[in-house]
Structures are given as structure tokens and as C-alpha cells.
Image (cartoon, rainbow, N blue to C red):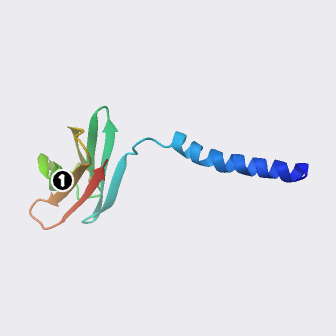
Amino acid sequence: MNVLTRTTAFVTAGALLAAPAALLIASPAQADTQRSGACGQGRYEFSVDREDRGFELSADLDFVEPGSSWKVVLRHEGKTILSRTVRADAEGDLDVEAYRQNTKGKDTFAFRATRVGTSTSCGAKITVS
């Protein structure tokens, strides 16, 4: 093997070994999770973020009719943890937040928003381990 071939092989092997290690170092142990989509004529965003020894849940509606009322429900493992009727602000936005302790195994969270007096609704589910 000449010097150029050995150098190329060494550099290639080093790069192949370093790439997975860099991904392990750069990635969090458990990434925060988010879902978004349409909600009537607006949009929703539902996120679950690791916070201390639990999870912070956030559900936002944007671009809905200003002043409209929405029933927002958050669930953890099928149990209701928040059920609230919220009015959209002058910009057509609303948000709710809740905190839940981590439980053994996977945690499943669900969000549902329904416009009061209509059949318009949206929702999402997030499972984290």
C-alpha cells in the first residue's frame, strides 16, 4: 500500500467511525415531540416537552375566528387531565398548558379541540418513551 492509499483508507475509516458518535452526542436522549395540522380554518400545534421529571403539554390554536369558543381536552393514558372552554383572542389565537409527572413505560398524551356549538374539531396523539 502506498502512502496515499493508506492515508485515504485511514481518513475514510475515521469518518465512518466519527459520524455515528457525533450523532449520539448531538442528539438528546429523548427529543421533544410535536404534532400540527388543520383545525377548521385555523391550525393547531400540540407538543409534549420533557421538563424535569415529567412532561409539559402545550396545545395552541392559531388563525381561528377571533372571539370563538373552543372546548379543549388534554388526556394522559386516556384520563382527562384538563378540560376547559377557552375563547380565542383578537388575533384568533388560544393556548392551554398542563404538566404531568412521568409514569413507568411509555406515556401517551392526547389533545382534542372542538369549537363550541359546531362539529368543527381537531386533535392529535403523542406517545413518548
100 in relation to 73, above or below: above
Specify whether residue 91 is in view: no
The number of callouts visible is 1
In the displayed orientation, state which residue is furthest to the top.
52
In the displayed orientation, state which residue is furthest to the right.
2
> Residue 34, how many percent across, how many down?
35, 52
> Residue 55, how many percent across, how many down?
27, 40
> Residue 114, how many percent across, how many down?
15, 60
Q: Residue at x 28, y 61 (%)?
A: 42
Q: Residue at x 14, y 53 (%)?
A: 78
Q: Secondary structure at mark 1?
A: loop
Specify whether residue 54 is in view: yes
In the displayed orientation, state which residue is furthest to the left.
117
> Residue 52, how many percent across, how many down?
31, 31
Q: Quadrant of residue 70?
A: bottom left
Kind of residue at badge 1: Gly
Q: Which residue is mark 1?
A: 67
Q: Is residue 79 left or right of residue 103?
A: left
Q: Is residue 30 left or right of residue 86?
A: right
